[in-house]
Image (cartoon, rainbow, N blue to C red):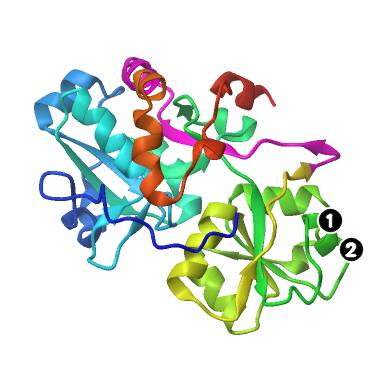
Amino acid sequence: MTDHGTVSRRGLFRAGGIGLAAIAFGPALAACSRTEDTVTLDSLRKQGYIQVAINNEAPFGYIDENGEVTGSSPELLRAIFAELGVPEVRAESVAWDGLIPGLKAKRFDAVAAGMYITPERCAEVAFAEPTYRVLQAFLVPAGNPYGLTTFDDIAANPDVTVAVLNASVEQGYAKGAGVPEAQIETVDNQTSAYELLSNGRVDAVALSTLSLNRLLNQRGGDFEVTEGFIPVVDGEEVTPAGGLAFRQSDTELLAEVNRVLADFKASGRLLEILEPFGFTEQELPGDLTTEQLCQA
């Protein structure tokens, strides 16, 4: 997948959707952490909004050129909660390694960052049913001078360094392929990863094909996205697929989200919401379940 076409503006958050104030006043919002043991749909309806976190990674959840939060995950969450009678979504951008700790600490009610569903994360948070599956790839200088096709190629060449998001699955994929720590640079977001590559401080950036194609489309440069691949960790293929994350205690809320999500999948609305961000039928999860991903 090397389509660098412009993402449609359809579906961006407008008035009554995600508010920019949530980004501008992130620290203040953090001070207003929830104290109740669980968050219910009734409580969200009464307050009129749900608080979520993104990581500013396009196309999954990011701040656009107008300073508004958009992306496949927050747009999907907004549509789901509109169906559930919660009219507003408030968001803040959080470093990747702060998403799960912040959710567990009740700093926000959900993570809408396109987070991959893995057994390790399932032990800490509760995922809704998967909304997409993708392939992994690298952003590399044009011509791919080191001939990188998988993480094994990086592990085999001590001269190659790769940038990954801290606490991301790509970090785990690299380690699982035997890439030494000295060859892995961790960053908080995809923009920082791009800057490292642009400045020649790393030789590749590892993310999903969708993220890298969008990043290249946004930032340009004499780079290319390698062909997508399925990661292999400790000799076993893994499935890069993800969805919305909630606290494990919010079981009623999760059940309602999954109910609406099932309707969206059956009606085709899921793809309609995701398409403006570069998703196609190829990236839909099909019959893949969260239970399968949590036990993988």
Can you say which quadrant of the picture contains the N terminus?
bottom right
x and y, in percent, of residue 254 in the image: 37, 21
Report the amino acid beneath label 1: Asp
Say if the magenta span includes residue 188.
Answer: no
Q: Is residue 197 above or below residue 239?
A: below
Q: Secondary structure at mark 1?
A: helix
x and y, in percent, of residue 5 in the image: 45, 62
How far apart in space, not on screen, are marks 1 and 2 (Cα)? Answer: 6 Å
Report the amino acid beneath label 2: Ala
| Residue receiving disc 2 | 156
The answer to whether mark 1 and mark 2 are in CB contact below 8 A is yes
Q: Is residue 99 above or below residue 127?
A: below
Residue at position x 55%, y 23% in the image: 290
Q: Which residues are magenta?
A: 233-262
Say if the magenta span includes residue 254.
Answer: yes
Q: How many marks?
A: 2
x and y, in percent, of residue 78 in the image: 25, 37
Q: Quadrant of residue 231?
A: top right
Q: Is residue 222 left or right of residue 82?
A: right
**Is residue 252 in view from this perspective?**
yes
| Residue receiving disc 1 | 152
In terms of depth relative to the viewer, which is nearer, 163 or 39?
Answer: 163
Residue at position x 70%, y 57% in the image: 227
In terms of depth relative to the viewer, which is nearer, 167 or 162?
Answer: 162
- Badge 2 local density, few (<14 within 10 Å), some, or many (20+)? few
Q: Secondary structure at mark 2?
A: loop
Residue at position x 87%, y 69% in the image: 157
**Is residue 107 in view from this perspective?**
no
Can you say which quadrant of the picture contains the C terminus?
top right
- Badge 1 local density, few (<14 within 10 Å), some, or many (20+)? some
In terms of depth relative to the viewer, which is nearer, 115 or 188?
Answer: 115
Residue at position x 19%, y 30% in the image: 82
